[in-house]
Image (cartoon, rainbow, N blue to C red):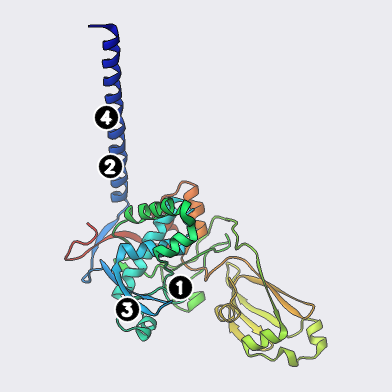
């Protein structure tokens, strides 16, 4: 037997051994991932309805399309959170979005039923969760990023399959928002007058994002038209001194405006934000050169999970379980089970 033959055979055996090690390592990695996901589940919760299918009201076309829940979640996570975010943040978003959808199946939204009685949920983000189609994903991400982004979101959804958030055994309403401005989230009762024990004010990470400082400017006539006020009728001297224009009457501990007076007319912070289409209720203002300039911090209502904060926590090494339990007080992660063993 020649030396060359022995070397060739040794190399062949070495390659086979390396191949076996690679596959074994991949299998172990996959198994550990599954085990980790299993241990992040605190309990199982049984529900009567099978949430494997959901009837979605497409806002643009006003048509109802039935699709699989996980398929629906692909469009929600893609629409609600940048695919460039950390995987653990995307997993947290997937669990929150799934919980929200299942909650709508259990407790129908009257706003949706009023539009289409046979629909479960709307893609209108002002009513329920945003959602985009595969075609829109391709358009947003471009052909070079589409495959990678879709794969990442799919991994986030499959890595949390069947998992929802519960508080004392009941599925929660897991509202979320883009950015709290890094200054902390808000109690639900200070935004919607409904106090929920799992939607409490919590500290955030002090993150900086593109919503840290945004400005909106309005003429006096625009303010009157949007708010139904009569600023234009005030004496010029009042306008020059900022007298009677806008006065903040109450703020939350996190610095959000709870009540404000404009030309003697009172609005809640949420009302003013909606009417003026402000990014946030945490704002400051200045009257200059006949215009009202409002500078905001953050984006969204400020209740529940802060998406930019979630990404920041994920970047610090927190997993999706830790992220969710930070923003939703006292919750557990449950694996939903039905008579059809959905999510197994």
| Sequence-wise first label, 4 or 1 | 4
Q: Which residue is depicted at the point 78% across and 84% down?
A: 239
**Residue 274 rendering spot, x and y as whole percentages:** 56, 79
* Residue 65 location, quadrant: bottom left
- Is disc 1 placed on a helix, strand or loop? loop
**Badge 3 is on which residue?**
119
**Badge 4 is on which residue?**
20
Compared with 180, 237 (above or below) is below
Question: Label 2 crowding class (10 Å Cα cut-off): few <14, some 14-19, many 20+?
Answer: few
Compared with 228, 257 (above or below) is above
- The quadrant in which the C terminus is found is bottom left
- Label 3, label 4: how many angstroms apart (C-alpha)? 51 Å
Question: Label 1 crowding class (10 Å Cα cut-off): few <14, some 14-19, many 20+?
Answer: few
Q: Which mark is residue 301?
A: none
Q: Which residue is depicted at the point 26% across and 20% down?
A: 13
| Sequence-wise first label, 3 or 4 | 4
- Label 1, label 3: how many angstroms apart (C-alpha)? 15 Å
| Sequence-wise first label, 1 or 3 | 3
**Badge 1 is on which residue?**
125
- Label 4, label 2: how many angstroms apart (C-alpha)? 16 Å
- Tell me if residue 291 can be seen: yes
Question: Label 3 crowding class (10 Å Cα cut-off): few <14, some 14-19, many 20+?
Answer: many
Toward the viewer: 1 or 319? 1
Toward the viewer: 262 or 21? 21
- Tell me if residue 166 can be seen: no
**Badge 2 is on which residue?**
31
| Sequence-wise first label, 1 or 2 | 2
- Label 1, label 2: how many angstroms apart (C-alpha)? 37 Å
> Between tags 4 and 2, which lies in front?
4
Q: Is residue 258 left or right of residue 196?
A: right
């Amino acid at each position: 037997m020649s030396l060359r033959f022995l070397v060739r055979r040794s190399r062949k055996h070495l390659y086979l051994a390396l191949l076996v090690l690679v596959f074994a390592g991949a299998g172990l990695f996959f198994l550990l991932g599954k085990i980790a996901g299993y241990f992040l589940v605190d309990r199982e919760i049984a529900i009567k309805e099978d949430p494997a299918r959901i009837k979605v009201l497409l806002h643009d076309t006003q048509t109802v399309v039935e699709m699989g829940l996980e398929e629906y979640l692909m469009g929600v996570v893609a629409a609600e959170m940048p695919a460039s975010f950390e995987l653990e943040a995307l997993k947290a978003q997937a669990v929150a979005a799934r919980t929200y959808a299942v909650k709508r199946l259990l407790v129908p939204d009257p706003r949706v039923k009023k539009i289409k009685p046979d629909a479960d949920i709307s893609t209108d983000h002002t009513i329920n969760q945003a959602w985009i189609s595969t075609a829109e994903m391709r358009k947003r991400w471009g052909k070079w990023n589409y495959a990678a982004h879709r794969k990442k979101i799919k991994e986030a959804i499959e890595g949390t399959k069947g998992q929802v958030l519960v508080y004392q055994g009941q599925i929660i309403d897991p509202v979320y928002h883009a950015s709290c401005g890094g200054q902390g989230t808000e109690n639900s009762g200070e935004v919607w007058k409904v106090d929920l024990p799992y939607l409490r004010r919590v500290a955030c990470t002090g993150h900086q994002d593109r919503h840290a400082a945004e400005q909106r400017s309005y003429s006096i006539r625009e303010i009157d038209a949007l708010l139904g006020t009569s600023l234009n009728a005030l004496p010029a001297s009042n306008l020059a001194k900022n007298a009677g224009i806008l006065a903040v009457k109450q703020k939350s501990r996190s610095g959000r405006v709870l009540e404000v007076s404009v030309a003697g007319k009172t609005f809640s912070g949420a009302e003013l934000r909606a009417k003026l289409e402000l990014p946030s209720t945490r704002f400051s203002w200045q009257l200059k050169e006949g215009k009202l300039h409002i500078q905001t911090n953050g984006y969204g209502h400020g209740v529940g999970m802060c998406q930019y904060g979630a990404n920041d926590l994920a970047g610090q090494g927190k997993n999706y379980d830790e992220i969710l339990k930070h923003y939703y007080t006292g919750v557990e992660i449950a694996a939903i089970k039905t008579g059809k063993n959905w999510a197994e």
